Amino acid sequence: MNRKHRKTLHALFAHPEPANLSPIDVEHVLEELGAQLKERSGAKFCATLNGHSANFHHAHHSLPKDEVRQIRGFLKDAGIDPARDYPL
């Protein structure tokens, strides 16, 4: 995982949630972690990682804070800990 992806992953776990995360960068991080992304109807996609699945919306600009919290929860459920697994 390159440095940009690591920074994005750590930003997902930051408190308070950032309001300027690029949705494309987050999708790349999910793919880099090994998640399978499948397009759904409308502006949605499904991410599957380590046996856990979640549906997310495709944002056009930056991710809303509630979406950041949802992605963070999904990653925690999948066993991802950026401080342990992907230190900066």
Image (cartoon, helix red, strand yellow):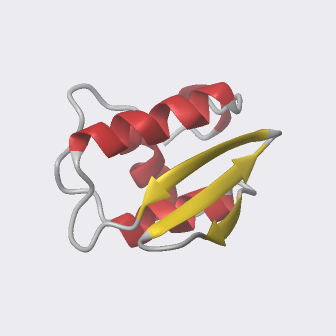
Residue 68 coordinates in the image, percent (x, y)? 35, 42
Q: Residue at x 54, y 68 (%)?
A: 28
Q: Residue at x 23, y 41 (%)?
A: 65
Question: Left of 39 or right of it: where is 27?
Answer: left
Against 78, is 30 above or below? below
Count of labels shown? 0
Residue 59 coordinates in the image, percent (x, y)? 31, 66
Residue 9 coordinates in the image, percent (x, y)? 47, 47
Name the foreground residue: 22 vs 70.
70
Question: Left of 27 or right of it: where is 7?
Answer: left
Q: Residue at x 47, y 54 (%)?
A: 56
Does residue 3 show up? no
Which quadrant of the rendered structure holds the N terminus? bottom right
Residue 37 coordinates in the image, percent (x, y)? 66, 66
The residue lying furthest to the right in this view is 51
Against 61, is 79 above or below? above
Q: Residue at x 57, y 35 (%)?
A: 74
Name the foreground residue: 33 vs 2.
33
Name the foreground residue: 54 vs 19.
54
Question: Left of 63 or right of it: where is 53?
Answer: right
Does residue 77 show up? yes
